[in-house]
Image (cartoon, helix red, strand yellow):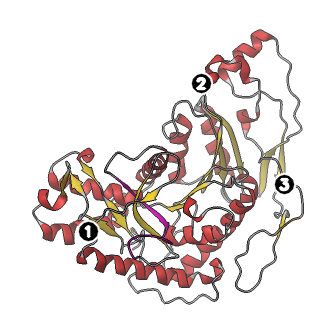
Amino acid sequence: MAVAQFNPNCTKTHLHSSQLSFLSRSLPRHRHCAFAPLHRTQHGKISCSVAPNQVQVPAVQTQEPKSKPECYGVFCLTYDLRAEEETRSWKKLINIAVSGAAGMIANHLLFKLASGEVFGPDQPIALKLLGSERSIQALEGVAMELEDSLFPLLREVSIGIDPYEVFQDAEWALLIGAKPRGPGMERADLLDINGQIYAQQGRALNAVASRNVKVIVVGNPCNTNALICLKNAPNIPARNFHALTRLDENRAKCQLALKAGVFYDKVSNVTIWGNHSTTQVPDFVNAKIDGLPVKEVVKDHKWLEEEFTEKVQKRGGALIQKWGRSSAASTSVSIVDAIRSLITPTPKGDWFSTGVYSTGNPYGIAEGIVFSMPCRSKGDGDYELVKDVIIDDYLRQRIAKTEAELLAEKRCVAHLTGEGIAVCDLPGDTMLPGEM
């Protein structure tokens, strides 16, 4: 399929001061551009030298990289922002890369990002959208809708199918794209197929993204995909990689609020432990309702241990039965929540759940996996693990089960993380929420 690309050999327009004033209020940039078809070529900028037990990371750069991926439509237009007085209070533009950008989750998420809902009303952004050859026309449609929405904070949009171009200088990478598990597909096959995608994206981030890029992996199996990604990006701190378990936390808060007859904002200190699968552990032992331990408010402890836990674990599947498709809008909301938890100071005494690299954790959980745990942030994009939590026998038993599942998944993708030959001994019941 031919891919549409704008010719970067553009000529700036010389404007009178009155014209400049008008454009400065209406468009971020102004440039005449030619539109021409471009056939996809194989990425030829990176060559790799790989030993049997090494992760395939870019080793030698054989060509000069492009300074940035090509822009789209009105976002190729450029003008001098100095005439716009309002921008004096704006922050420096940040680059946000999104994979799977033509999908349903991204369709909800991108407009939240562009509106200022996520990073704030004074934070201009550039969106870098990654698709595939099959989805490139849909990706152009997404860019057209972003054009037509007239978001003043959205200063640049670029689209492409090569992660080495799209991830250039990315400061946030929201990795949504992944192949769903089809009928008759073994879980090991799904791990390998999506693992190949995330290994490539990890190498691309390692080669061209900001050295302090924050990565949130949404595509399933997200914990192990995040592990593969970080192992293929050794020049980026491992703690910068997250697997999205915030939707599971939100679902747990919803069920506790319904049971207690309170609104969501009364529920706090909820942790999702472990894998984003049906072995995940929604923690009611440390959770609070209106400042009180959940077990003091909800006296039906059998409900907490059985029905509550199962509802959260299988909420995705229940939604598919009702809706006919997996969650998209609520997933995009949880991505927003996950980002804001990292860029906003955590309320005193509270915490949030995210899947992070387990090495150095204080809970006795196996090291070297991506495991959802309770975290706090100072609002600087970083986090710290919460130490003042109770892990009783009930939690420890269930945490051990989800830990074993993640260790099995890790062995199954050893060939993608540089840890030897893959051995797949996955538990028979290992499933993602929503898998039938």
Residue 337 place in picture, x, y as percent: 43, 48
Q: Secondary structure at mark 1?
A: helix
* Residue to which mark 2 is pinned: 89
Residue 147 place in picture, x, y as percent: 64, 34
Q: Earlier in the sequence, mark 2 or mark 1?
A: 2
Are there few (<14), some (14-19), or many (20+) residues within 10 Å of tag 3? some
Residue 222 place in picture, x, y as percent: 50, 67
- Nearer to us of marks 2 and 1 is 2
* Residue to which mark 1 is pinned: 309
Amino acid of disc 1: Thr
Are there few (<14), some (14-19), or many (20+) residues within 10 Å of tag 1? many
* Residue to which mark 3 is pinned: 65
User: What residue span does the magenta drawing correspond to?
Assistant: 351-364
20 magenta-colored? no
Against 264, is 211 above or below? Answer: below
Q: Earlier in the sequence, mark 2 or mark 3?
A: 3
